[in-house]
Amino acid sequence: MIKHSHNINQNGIFNYFKIETSQLNMIIFKAAILVIVICLYRLFKSETARKAYVLFAAGAFAHLFDTLFYGYTLEYIYFYKVITYDLKDYYIDAGVSILLLLFLINENKKIEEKRR
């Protein structure tokens, strides 16, 4: 269901548990996450991992942008009274999912090499 809402608490888990946070704390947190993601992007050489970090960075930047200019994040995809999402959340989830898959594939290769 498409539903327009203003996410004032800035974080899905904080909204779910009704925990209040200040806008300044969320701006600092989101900026720190964005810096970490950019540093990790520069660290990894795998093209797939770099694409995952680009997705993650795009979502993190959009969250930071919303918080800086609007004071909240705009959410518009509503899931059964549980969570409200938007495109930037999907970008972050896709980036994290790709990184997890790469990690699992790499670990599986290491296990296979040890067996030989």
Image: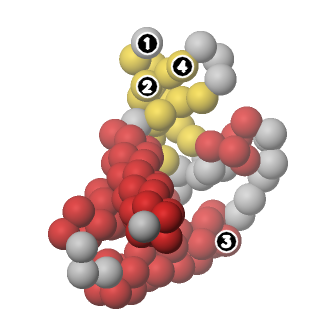
* Residue pictured at 42% horizontal, 29% vertical: 76
Q: Which mark is residue 25?
A: 3
Contact check, label 4 and label 2, Cβ < 8 Å: yes
Q: Secondary structure at mark 3?
A: helix
> Which residue is tagged 1?
1
Q: Amino acid at mark 3?
A: Asn
Per the model, the C-alpha gap separating discs 4 and 3 is: 27 Å
User: What x and y, as percent, mark residue 110?
Assistant: 45, 68
Q: Amino acid at mark 2?
A: Ile
Q: Quadrant of the C terminus?
A: bottom left
Task: Tell which circle, 4 or 1, labels the residue nearer the N-terminal end.
Answer: 1
User: What x and y, as percent, mark residue 9?
Assistant: 66, 49
Q: Amino acid at mark 4?
A: Phe
105 in relation to 83, above or below? below
Task: Tell which circle, 4 or 3, labels the residue nearer the N-terminal end.
Answer: 3
79 in relation to 66, above or below? above
Quarter-of-image position of residue 38:
bottom left
Quarter-of-image position of residue 106:
bottom left
User: What x and y, as percent, mark residue 1?
Assistant: 43, 12
29 in relation to 43, above or below? above
Quarter-of-image position of residue 21:
bottom right
Contact check, label 2 and label 1, Cβ < 8 Å: yes
Task: Tell which circle, 2 or 3, labels the residue nearer the N-terminal end.
Answer: 3
> Which residue is tagged 2?
77
> Which residue is tagged 4?
79
Q: Judge left or right: residue 45 versus residue 111.
A: left
